[in-house]
Amino acid sequence: MALVNRSDESVLISFDPATGKEVGRVAVSSPSEVKDVVERSRTAFGLWQHTSFDERRSLIMKARELILADIDGIAELISRESGKPFGEAIAMEIVPVLDLMQHYARHTKYELKPRRISIGLYSLLGRRSRIIYKPWGVIGIIPAWNYPFTIPLGEAVMALMCGNSVVIKPSELTPLTGLKIGEIFETAGAPDDLVQIICGSAETGEALVDAHPDKIQFTGSVGVGKKIAAKAAETLTPVVLELGGKDPMIVFDDADIELAARGAVWGAFCNSGQSCSSVERLYVQKAIATQLTDRIVELTKGLKQGNGLREDVSLGAMSSQRQLDLVKKHIENFRDSGAEILTGGKSSGLFFEPTVIAGATNDMQGMRDETFGPTLPICVFETENDAIALANDCEFGLTASVWTKDHAKAKRVAEQIDAGTVCINEVLYTHGIAQTPWGGVKNSGLGRTHGREGLLELVRPQHIHTNRFALLPDAWWMPYSSTAVKTFRDLAAKFASGSLIRTTTMLPRLWKRLRELKKDRT
Ligand code: NAD
């Protein structure tokens, strides 16, 4: 069943993965329309960049009020387009983005305050340096379908607070949720063309990259991320890439087993495992392996799966046939490689049962490639070093978690894991904390969203340097002479040491050189 069909070149149909029914249809933007959208966005940026932080904050807070007033309506739309449970749409999309909106509306001004830089001994020469932060211009946002509201909206809010304009190309699986973001800003009174939404599939995303926005924030697969980076490199357009994950959860034998079991079940199965930071590999220490596995299986068997609009459903449908087929392939590979399916393993329509797998090892496909489905493969380890080696034996590095009551061990292990975020006795949810940086290492991507690091991706730092005693030429200017070269040697040995005491011993030579330069001027 193809869930997204184009009935003709210009229309995209969005389907409810739980029922197969149409949710709505939207017009596809042609490449020339996309070009026009980016041009208009640049015009909107021309005015928006000069607005005060208070004006920007007022727009974001109005948009926030509109979301608060329609929580259920928005959650229903997200659930119908993506298949995720209605409650999860509130908890994992609307709550975090509301928090992000209030945070950046209030704090961007302080985070981006112009800043004096300490320039060491140069300040004795009357020099001052300052950094100011300027917006890039048009930010092109290309998100995935799995968090179709919180990811593009959160990125747009941060971009707008920094003074940029935005063009969002939502996933072809969730275009109506994308259009909802545009509608919210329009109702909130955003200036014309400040926030524009263009709909379509890969071709529309390519057209957005070709239209040369000033920066691209992409969330999606590694393959597409690399293609976008290659194309963007032709025009030196900077990119932030938020890509896939294969996140490990390490449970030591001194962990709280009940908490770890519940964390593993939520971390692996929320959003039907379609989170970039889902638990995709669980490593458990031998002494508690049976106990933890049994409890995970018991909890998993108690989960209700069904139409995400029902409040008592914990797992909804998967978002697409492509995704379901990949999960099936990984399950078959686990079976063929000798792992044991303890519960789950079957599908019906686009529903795939939450599946727990024992006897997994790192050479199996489902332990190496991103599954992005409701699977929880479990692998047993013996020592701390084994756990670290197993976790790092992977091409991805988005998030990881370490579970133990020994905080010194937790910290020691966390610091050795190659990942953008490592949680201790916690799992998956830190994308929801707007203040903390989000992003991965290795094939999980480039750059950061969220946190101060995320804000800095959305501005260009400009260094302003002033010579407050602009009376004489600098000692290192032309013309050169033997006095000049002796002065330069002194600069190397004394001034560049950073020591004030050593530098003062070269003052007579410096004075001679300055007099020489002064004489040359007269
Ligand atoms: P995808 O790469 O297929 O598509 C992502 C977006 O790119 C969509 O909007 C799509 O239309 C667009 N696109 C596709 N081809 C394009 C091209 N050639 N040029 C420009 N745009 C193009 O990914 P997906 O299936 O939508 O999402 C799943 C992936 O996203 C998973 O790998 C998941 O881990 C990742 N993801 C990562 C994060 C993160 O923060 N690291 C968050 C969510 C999802």
Image (cartoon, rainbow, N blue to C red):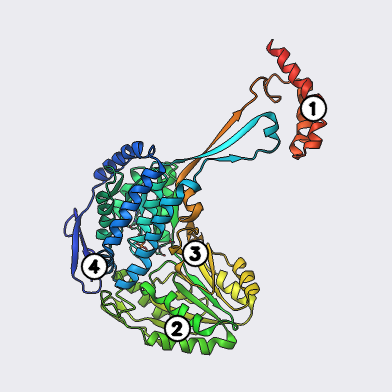
Task: State whether label 4 is within 8 Å of ligand 1.
Answer: no
Which residue shows up at 65% across the image and 72% down it?
A: 408
Q: Is mark 3 within 8 Å of ligand 1?
A: yes
Residue annotated with mark 1: 507
What's under tag 2, amino acid-wise? Ile
Residue drawn 53% across and 84% down? 257
Regarding mark 2 in the picture, which secondary structure is present there? strand
Q: Amino acid at mark 3?
A: Leu
Disc number at residue 243? none
Label 2 neighbour load within 10 Å: few <14, some 14-19, many 20+: many
214 or 331, which lies in front?
214
Q: Earlier in the sequence, mark 3 or mark 1?
A: 3
Instruction: Identify the image quadrant of residue 17.
Output: bottom left
Residue under label 3: 398
* Residue occupying the far left of the picture: 7
Measuring from the top left, give residue 478's x and y in whole percent: 68, 20
Q: Amino acid at mark 4?
A: Leu
Q: CA distance from mark 4 to mark 2?
A: 29 Å
Tell me which image quadrant ligand 1 sits in.
bottom left
Q: Say few, some or many: other residues with alpha carbon within 10 Å of mark 1 (under 14 / 14 to 19 / 20 or more).
A: few
SS at badge 4: loop
Amino acid of disc 1: Leu
Q: Residue furthest top?
A: 522
Please give the residue where the numbered disc 2 appears in the rendered image: 357
Q: Nearer the viewer, residue 84 or 328?
A: 84
Mark 1 Cβ inside 8 Å of ligand 1: no
Verify CB contact (< 8 Å) between mark 1 and mark 4: no
Residue, disc 4: 3
